[in-house]
Image (cartoon, rainbow, N blue to C red):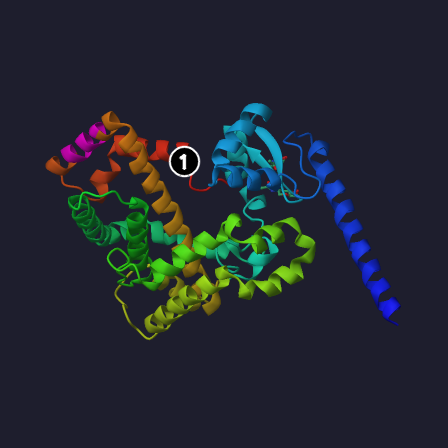
Amino acid sequence: MAFLIISSILLALVTFVIHVLISRIRFFKLRKRIGLDGPEPHWFLGNLKEIIERKRAIGYDNSNEWFRELHKKYGDKFGIYFGKQLTIAISNEEDIKEVFITNFSNFSDRIVAPIFQETQLITSLLQSSYKTGWKNCRSAIAPIFATGKMKAMHSTVTSKIDTFLSILEEKSEQGEKWDIYDDFQGLTLDVIGKCAFAVDSDCQRNRKEVFYVQARNFVNNIDIRHSPLISTSFILPELAWIWRSAYKYTALAAAEQPLVDGLSSVYERRRAGEGAESVDLLKLLLDRENDKQRPMSKREVIENCFAFLLAGYETTSTAMTYCTYLLSRHPTVQQKLYDEIHEAKMSTGLDYDSIHSLKYLDAVYKETLRVFPPVIQ
Ligand SMILES: *[C@@H]1O[C@H](CO)[C@@H](O)[C@H](O)[C@H]1NC(C)=O
Ligand SMILES: *[C@@H]1O[C@H](CO)[C@@H](O)[C@H](O)[C@H]1NC(C)=O
């Protein structure tokens, strides 16, 4: 009996290993078949092996640099394997337009690794697919960026920036070095909290705010280096059911829950009528709940708020940090930018419209995004 059990287990294991190997051999031929080149994949890890090794060797993610090297070597269209998943990198302007504009309906979906299918983001704009309502989410969220609404947010943003500047002044008076990234994170979280949910958080002064602690925690734990489980789930999607059931024990899930709970309670308060006069993202989504034609569920509303918080906070604070870094390395650019802003402030004051006419500011920010893109995929 024991022999039978052991041999069945062994047989199952061998079959599984053979299945994994064969499917990899098949996937690793795909790139060539569609006429693309790229770095040789490791038989099991694909090109994730290089990504992990590079991170280990230098201690931080410099995938941007790696992509630049690959671009030099393979031209403006090549393929890399994240585990066994083929990903095509393009950098030709025409190709990018085709993917992002002309054929966008065929490209809006993202790969969601099995483990991420358990996050409370799955019905949000970040993870939902064209089939599961991406378009509906998008049409609910897009109006928040309309000019009128952005103008209405201007004074909120300005007051948060005033706090930011006084914190920088206090810190620089102490004469010590500090990491400005933390301050940018606090600033973006406070702005998003107020503009998207009408929540008066104080992440800038209070480093114990739940938004601040858990949003940082969540983003840190998405990093492959910090979570062997996430990287393994990319490498072995065949065991999706294991990764999915393990999700709730991860640090990612632990960071996620307080954020979702916080947003749920804001949601309940708003439904009960709090902040009725505020025009923000949550208000727009709540209105959608009553929309007969394209209704949104409570879950969709909360998950979209969560996605907005995470995606907006991480990318914006990273980009602003790199911008200050580049300005510190290029003092003549810094001076020119200062002069442009100063001049606008003296002549018309800094409001929504005058900021939009600052061409040099626009150029500096775009160049920052080009040199250090906060999102590489
Ligand atoms: C875009 O769509 C056209 C027409 O359906 C098709 O011929 C073309 O190959 C598509 N491009 C991409 C990049 O998929
Ligand atoms: C999307 O893909 C389908 C199937 O390949 C194709 O028929 C359709 O034309 C594509 N649509 C766009 C907008 O590219």
Q: Nearer the viewer, residue 284 or 330?
A: 330
**Disc 1 residue type?**
Phe
Residue 201 visible (yes or no): yes
Residue 69: x %, y % from top left? 53, 27
Callout 1 environment at 10 Å: few (<14), some (14 to 19), or many (20+)?
A: some
- Is 92 placed left or right of 355 in the picture? right
Q: Nearer the viewer, residue 121 or 243?
A: 243
Q: Nearer the viewer, residue 13 or 370?
A: 13
Residue 327: x %, y % from top left? 28, 32
Residue 142: x %, y % from top left? 40, 52
- Is 183 placed left or right of 348 in the picture? right
Residue 297 visible (yes or no): no
Q: Quadrant of residue 306?
A: bottom left
Instruction: Look at the magenta stretch and give its main secondary structure.
Output: helix
- Is 74 placed left or right of 260 in the picture? right
Does residue 65 lie above or below 189 as drawn? Answer: above
Q: Quadrant of ligand 1?
A: top right
Question: Circle 1 — which element?
Answer: loop
- Is 232 placed left or right of 276 in the picture? right
Q: Quadrant of the N terminus?
A: bottom right
In magenta, the rendered stretch is 335-343
Q: Nearer the viewer, residue 195 or 311?
A: 311
Q: Residue furthest bottom?
A: 272
Q: Across the whole image, how many numbered discs are drawn on residues? A: 1
Residue at coordinates 42% horizontally, 37% vertically from top-left? 373
Question: Label 1 belongs to which residue?
Answer: 372
Residue 3: x %, y % from top left? 88, 67
Let me know if residue 340 is in the magenta part.
Answer: yes
Q: Is mark 1 within 8 Å of ligand 1?
A: no
Let me know if residue 213 is in the magenta part.
Answer: no
